[in-house]
Amino acid sequence: LDVLILCQGTVVYRRGEFEREGWDRVMAVNLDSLMHISRKFRAQLSQASGSIVIVSSISGLKANIGNPAYAASKAGAISLTKTLGQAFAADGIRVNGLAPGLVDTKLTKVTTQNAERLQGALAQIPQRRMGTPEDMAGAAIFLASPLASYVTGHTLIVDGGLSL
């Protein structure tokens, strides 16, 4: 195995993450699974001098109104990227991350399919557009490639300037 992309995520709306069930569900998918999967493939990645790319979110860098588990899990993913980057380096495995801004996905439909919310969101992004899957793929390919051979533990923010 040369490259492992960890791009799982869930969210619970309507303040469900403030309750234990919602919190636990989001943490299990967004954070716990990252560690479990990384551990499962560590030996294979080491044999191939492979690379892991952990997809987090800019929500891991700031507050996310109404979604404390999502924000905390993505902050945890950014921290885990650093820690695994350090821990797995001796095995020849590079671990890096990608923190997207607004991209049209299942989880962002609450914004992208609401014209008023979308207009407000785009007004906050200096590039005045959403990110595309291609934007994210380019960054992930870079992080996984030999072009980033001396980069580990880093999370690349790909958000059109939203977090500035």
Image (cartoon, grey):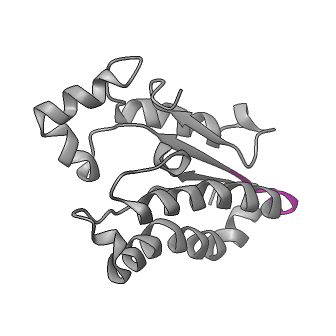
Q: Residue furthest bottom?
A: 21
Left or right of residue 45: residue 58: left
Report if residue 13 is visible in the image.
yes
When the figure is inspected, residue 141 is found, relative to residue 107, above or below; the finding is above
Instruction: Please state the horizontal and vertical placement of residue 108, each as a whole percent of the image.
Output: 26, 47
Q: How many marks?
A: 0
Residue at image location 54% in from the left, 40% down from the top: 140
Left or right of residue 2: residue 25: left
Please tell me in which quadrant of the rendered image residue 88 appears. bottom right
Quadrant containing the N terminus is bottom right
Residue at image location 73% in from the left, 62% down from the top: 84
Residue at image location 46% in from the left, 49% down from the top: 63
Instruction: Please state the horizontal and vertical placement of residue 136, each as a whole percent of the image.
Output: 45, 36
Residue stretch in magenta = 89-95
Instruction: Please state the horizontal and vertical placement of residue 66, each as a whole percent of the image.
Output: 33, 58
Examine the structure image and report whether residue 93 is included in the region drawn in magenta: yes
Please tell me in which quadrant of the rendered image residue 131 appears. top left
Instruction: Please state the horizontal and vertical placement of residue 42, each as a whole percent of the image.
Output: 69, 69
Examine the structure image and report whether residue 32 is included in the region drawn in magenta: no
Q: Residue furthest top?
A: 127
Q: Residue furthest right?
A: 90
Report if residue 8 is visible in the image.
no
When the figure is inspected, residue 159 is found, relative to residue 6, above or below; the finding is above
The one of 43 and 15 positioned closer to us in this rendering: 15
The one of 57 and 36 positioned closer to us in this rendering: 57
When the figure is inspected, residue 76 is found, relative to residue 61, above or below; the finding is below
Left or right of residue 10: residue 161: right
Residue at image location 51% in from the left, 46% down from the top: 62
